[in-house]
Image: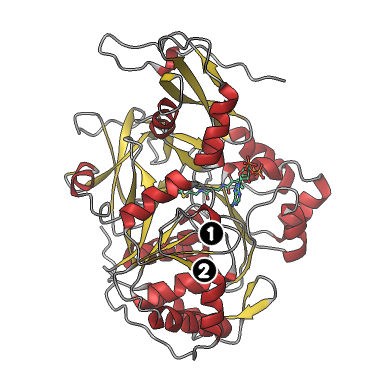
Amino acid sequence: MLHWPSLTLPELFDLSLILRRGECALEWDRTYTFGEIDARASQMANALYARGIAAGDRLCVYLSNSIAYIDLFLAATRLGVIFVPVNILYRDREIRHILEDADPAAVISDEANAPHIPDGAPLWRMEDLLREAAEQPATRRISVTDGDAPAALVYTSGTTGVSKGAIITHNAFAVNALNIISCWQIQSTDRLLLTLPLFHVHGLGNGLHCWLISGCRMRLTERFDHARAAEWMLDFEPTLFFGVPTMYVRLLDVEEDAARRIGERMRLFVSGSAPLPSQVLEAFRNRYGHTILERYGMSETLMNISNPYVGERRPGSIGLPLPGVSVRNLDPDGNPVNDGETGELYVRGSNVFSGYWRRPEASAAAFRDGWFRTGDLAVRSADGYYTLQGRAGDLILSGGFNIYPREIEEFLTEQPGVAEAAVAGVSDPLRGEVPVAWVVARVGTVGEIDCDALETACRSHLASFKIPRAFIVVDKLPRTALGKIQKHLLPPWKRES
Ligand code: MCA
C-alpha cells in the first residue's frame, strides 16, 4: 500500500494561493485572483480568532454555495477548527440533531436561512462575520500543523438512521484530492464549473479542493439549475464538470447544437454519488461526444474506485481502485469472493475517515480487521473492473442525496393516527430513486390517516428530498415470522400520469 506523508490542507492550498497569487481563480459575483482569495481567508481567520474560535472547536455552517462559504472553510482549516457542513435542505429536526451531536462553538447562517436554525443555538450571522472580516488585516494566521488533525465532521446516516459525524482529517482530504488530480489529469489550465453543493464531500473534497490545489479557474454557482446549466456552460466554456447522475439526465434535454458546442470545449465529465445508468451514459455520449467518467466514493472514505481517464470507461462499472486505496470483496463470513461473484466492498487507505465523532461503538462496528465496511455490494470482473450490485442496507439514493428509510419511518410513526410505517425507494427516471411510504393506521383510527397532513408534517420537518412521493395506507405491513418488514412484498405504487 502507498503511504503518503501527513499533509495539511493549507500547505497544499498555498500552491495556488501563494504561488499563483496573480492568476484568475474564481468567478462568483466578479472574478477573484488567488491572492484575493488568500487575503479574504486571512481576514476571515482573524475575524473568527477575534471571536474566540480556536483549534479543535466545531463550527457548523448552514449556508448555500457562495464565496463566503469558501472564506469560512479556508479560515477554519487554517485555524485547525473542525468544519461541520450542514445540508441547506435540512430542517429543524435534522439540524437540531447535528447541533446536539457536534456541540459547536457556533452555527453560522445568513438572513435567508437562519430562520431554520432552532432557537437557543449559538447562531452567528454570516453578514456580521463578513463585515468584521473586512475590518481585519490580511495577516496570515495558520495554526494547523498536523495532517492527522480533523478538518471536518461530515454527517452521514448509518443503517440505524441516526446521523453520525464522520471525522475527516486534513490528510484524508489531501490524499483524495491529490489522487484524483493526478488520475484525472487536472491542471491549472482547466476551467471547472462547480454547481454541486459545498456541504457534501463531492462538491467540497473533489470540487473545491481540486480547484485550490491544481490552481485551475472555477466558476461557482449557488446550486445546479437545470434551466440555466447549458447557458453557464456555453458562457464559461468549462473543461471540467463534476456532477451527480440527475444532472446528466437533465443535461440530455439541452438542444443538440448547444450540447455539441459544450462537448467541444469540455475535457472531462465526471459522475458520482449514485449509480449512472448505462443508457444515460450512452445517450450523453451521443449528444455531447463524451464518455462520462464514473467513479465511486462515500462520505466516510472520499473516493475509492474510478474508471480510468486514459483507457476504457466501462458503462455500468465504477472502474478500478484508485492508487493507495486497497479494496476487498468479501462474503458475509469475511472470506474473499471469486471474480464474477457478488461480495461486499471493504476499503482501506489514507483516504478513509478516522471514526464517527464521539461514537466509539459505531466507529468500531464500521470496521472489520481495519477495513472499512462500505455496505455496498459489488462484482469484480476478471480484468479488475468493479460493478455495483446494490446495498447491503436499505439506503435510498435520490438525486445523489442519501436517504435512510428508518429516519422517515420513525418520523411518520410519531404522527397522529399512524401505528406503523415502511419507507422504500422506487425507481425514478430523473432522480434514480424516490421515497414512498406505506402506513398502517392505529387501532380505532382506521380510515382516519390524513395523507395530506402527513405530507405537510414531512415538508416542515424534513429535507425536501426525503418527503415521500406518495403515502399508501395499508392494513398491515408484510413481515417475516421474526417480525422483520419485507419491503419487497409491499403493494406496488403506481405513479400517476
Ligand atoms: C436541490 N434542491 C436545492 C438544492 N438542490 N435547493 C437548494 N439548494 C440546493 N443545492 C431542491 C429544490 O429546491 C427542490 O426542492 C428539489 O431539491 C429538486 O430541485 P430541482 O430544481 O428540480 O433539481 P433537479 O434538477 O432535480 O436536480 C437536483 C439536484 C440535487 C440539483 C441534482 O439533487 C443535488 O444538488 N444533488 C447533489 C447531491 C450531492 O452533492 N451529493 C453528494 C453527496 P422542492 O422539491 O422542495 O421544490 S457526497 C457522496 O455521495 C459521495 C461521497 C460521493 O461519492 O460523491
Q: Nearer the viewer, residue 76 or 316?
A: 76
Check the image and tell me how it is coloured: secondary structure
- Which residue is label 1 attached to? 114
As drawn, 208 above or below 421: below
Task: Specify whether 271 is left or right of 283.
Answer: left
Which image quadrant is residue 176 in? bottom left
How far across and down, in percent of the image, does residue 453 sit?
57, 27
Q: Nearer the viewer, residue 215 or 365?
A: 365
Location of the C terminus by quadrant is: top right
Q: Residues within 10 Å of mark 2 (few under 14, many from 20)?
A: some
Residue name at image x 35 percent, y 51 percent: 300
Q: Amino acid at mark 2?
A: Arg
How far across and down, in percent of the image, does residue 227 sit?
75, 49
Q: Nearer the viewer, residue 87 or 234?
A: 87
Location of the N terminus by quadrant is: bottom left
- The kind of secondary structure element at disc 1 is helix
Task: Specify whether 468 is left or right of 145.
Answer: right
Count the marks.
2
| Distance in Å between CA atoms under marks 1 and 2 | 8 Å
How far across and down, in percent of the image, does residue 50 sit?
40, 83
- The kind of secondary structure element at disc 2 is strand
As drawn, 305 above or below 238: above
How far across and down, in percent of the image, does residue 289 sit?
70, 48
Q: Amino acid at mark 1?
A: Ala
Residue name at image x 52 percent, y 57 percent: 203
Please say if the residues under marks 1 and 2 sit with CB atoms less than 8 Å apart. Answer: yes
- Which residue is label 2 attached to? 125
As drawn, 247 above or below 419: below
Question: Which of disc 2 and disc 1 is earlier in sequence?
Answer: 1
Q: Is residue 296 visible?
A: no
